[in-house]
Image (cartoon, helix red, strand yellow):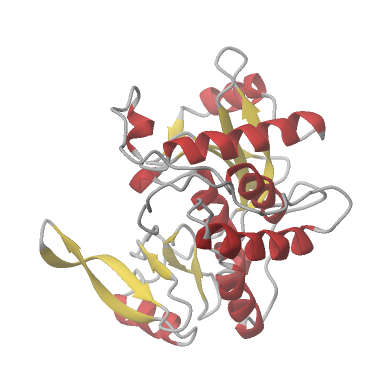
Amino acid sequence: MHPPELPQRDSSPDVTPVGLGGVGSGEKLADLTLQAFQLRSQYRYALHPVEAAFQYHRAEAEIPGEEGHGGSGFEQAEAHYRAGTQGLRLPEIPQLPQQLRELSRLGPVDRAGRKAIRKWAEEHGHVFDEDRFRRHWEAQGNRGGAEHQVYHDQETGRWIKRLYHGVNFSTLGDYLVRMRLHAVLFPETAYRLEGFTINARNKELAPVVSQPHVEVDTSRPLVTKSETDDLLAAMGFAPVQMIHDGLLDDGYFAYLHPVTGILTHDLHDENVVRLPETDDLAVIDPYIS
């Protein structure tokens, strides 16, 4: 849930910008979190600090997740996104959107964050060739779902996914946080950030991620909701009902962590699967917020 917009003030905030050169991404995010509290107290926009939730779930995890590789991890990308957005004033009266993606009330914030990431990606070699992605994607039949365009890389055995549509009016910052949370909660299927495609004509930025292939045991029955309940209960999550059209709806397969407030849903029997020759389950593609 985003904080409510507050009235603008004439005075500029006395907040020192956070520099991103020469320090680790963990230090950057700690500085950005401190800056967020300062900015919010002075009626400026700042992303919701989530580092405490990461620290809690990391401490509880049996194995650490892979939040990226090399210098192009989700944590570093999110730090640049945050640095590009924090301190902006949101319009006091929302303007009529010109494009569908601007229906999000955080459209101006997302544009600023994307601009910061685009600059970083171009300067540090994190651009994923768009033509290369499209060739592989089209060769495998234009696969994809509600969010991603997908193809299978046979050399690495990984699934390559490009975000083309942010669901639930989410921003790119929301998406990067979600990928980090997935790595902490479900490390065996953690995503890896491969880079960003940048459209040559309109400069539209899209993250490209990859995920390991999961071999599914199809010889046994599908995972039941009670099994998923037990799996998530062991991680501290409790099942909750979400509201759709004013009615409570179990179809979201949703679970809430009472300490950190993390909500994970869409945990139906295609996203929670059985692994061969074991009693273990794997969570493939949940929605986490």
Could you say which is closer to the camera, residue 218 or residue 234? Answer: 234
Q: Where is residue 1 in the image (x, y as percent from the top left)?
A: 37, 61
In the picture, residue 165 is in which quadrant?
top left
Could you say which is closer to the camera, residue 15 or residue 45? Answer: 15
Whether residue 149 is visible here, answered yes or no, is no
Q: Position of residue 87 (x, y in %)?
A: 57, 47
Q: Residue at x 70, y 73 (%)?
A: 64
User: Is residue 114 toward the left or the right of residue 226 in the image?
Assistant: right
Q: Position of residue 281 (x, y in %)?
A: 49, 74
Q: Residue furthest top?
A: 201
Whether residue 116 is visible here, answered yes or no, is yes
Q: In this picture, is 230 found above or below 147?
A: below
In the picture, residue 201 is in which quadrant?
top right
**Numbered-mark total:** 0
Q: Which residue is drawn at 30% across and 68% down?
A: 253
Q: Residue at x 54, y 48 (%)?
A: 173
Q: Position of residue 247 (x, y in %)?
A: 10, 64
User: Is residue 216 toward the left or the right of residue 263 in the image?
Assistant: right
In the picture, residue 266 is in which quadrant?
bottom left
